[in-house]
Amino acid sequence: MLNAVIDISHYNGAVDLAAAKADGIIGVIQKATEGTGYVDPSYAANRDKARAAGLLWGAYHFGTGAGGAAQATHFLSVVGDDPATLLALDFEANPSGPSMSLEEAKAFIVAVARRRGRFPGFYSNARIADELGDHVDPLLARCWLWAARYGSAPVVPKTWPTWTMWQYTDGHAGPEPHAVAGVGPCDRDRFNGDEAGLRRLWGQGETAVAAASPSELLAHGCGPRGC
């Protein structure tokens, strides 16, 4: 496992991503948006810092109880069309309002896949295991799994053969290490592979995530006029 990814938001305050790189970090995933209108105020500045430091850059959307396709449109309007930006959906309980439903999450995923030609990562904690149970969801299976669990190992629902990234700490709970130079205690993520695999996931090198075919998107309710 490669311990070289962090995920951040404006809650982390001012960060020095050059120092984080010197501390062994290779990739950064930043909260970009939430719902259909919110934009994280640190997104653009941290993206510029990451690029200047030569770090891999990713963006995630925090899902809420609004239309999934509309949330995808908002997310993509902020992150743009850069193929080197890794994309992910954060599917967990919303502490400040309605939570995204599984159907809204699927609509978000299909809309992103239609626009970008590849499926986003799917971040969740115990919620997705509770929702899916023993069911294997073929659409979610096309997303790489970003599992959150601050214990000895991540939980992998039957939909996925294994996890791709594991958020093992929030900077306080979970296994060590918790902190990163230039950032402090923060969300840290292990990658289930080596650096070459991480770069393939990010799209630098051989494509590791299969492109979404038109027939597959149609099968999930995404037609030529939209999702």
Image (tube, helix red, strand yellow):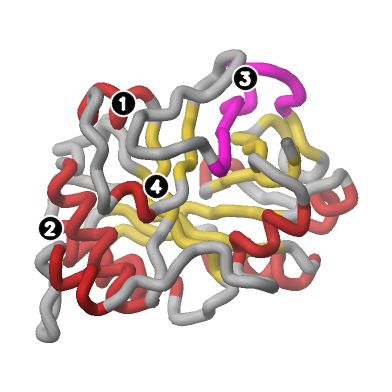
The residue under label 3 is which amino acid type?
A: His
Disc 2 and disc 4 in contact, CB within 8 angstroms: no
Q: Which residue is mark 4?
A: 122
Nearer to me, 135 or 25: 135
Q: Which residues are magenta?
A: 164-178
84 in magenta = no
Mark 1 or 2: the one toward you: 1
Disc 3 and disc 4 in contact, CB within 8 angstroms: no
Label whose residue precedes the other's in the sequence (2 or 4): 2
CA separation, marks 4 and 1? 12 Å
Disc 1 and disc 2 in contact, CB within 8 angstroms: no
CA separation, marks 2 and 3? 33 Å
The quarter of the displayed image where residue 197 is located: bottom right
**Residue 45 % position (x, y):** 60, 66
Q: Main secondary structure of the magenta part?
A: loop
Disc 2 and disc 3 in contact, CB within 8 angstroms: no
Mark 3 or 4: the one toward you: 4
Instruction: Give the residue drawn at x 72%, y 42%.
Output: 183
Residue 204 appears left or right of 63: right
Label for residue 172? 3
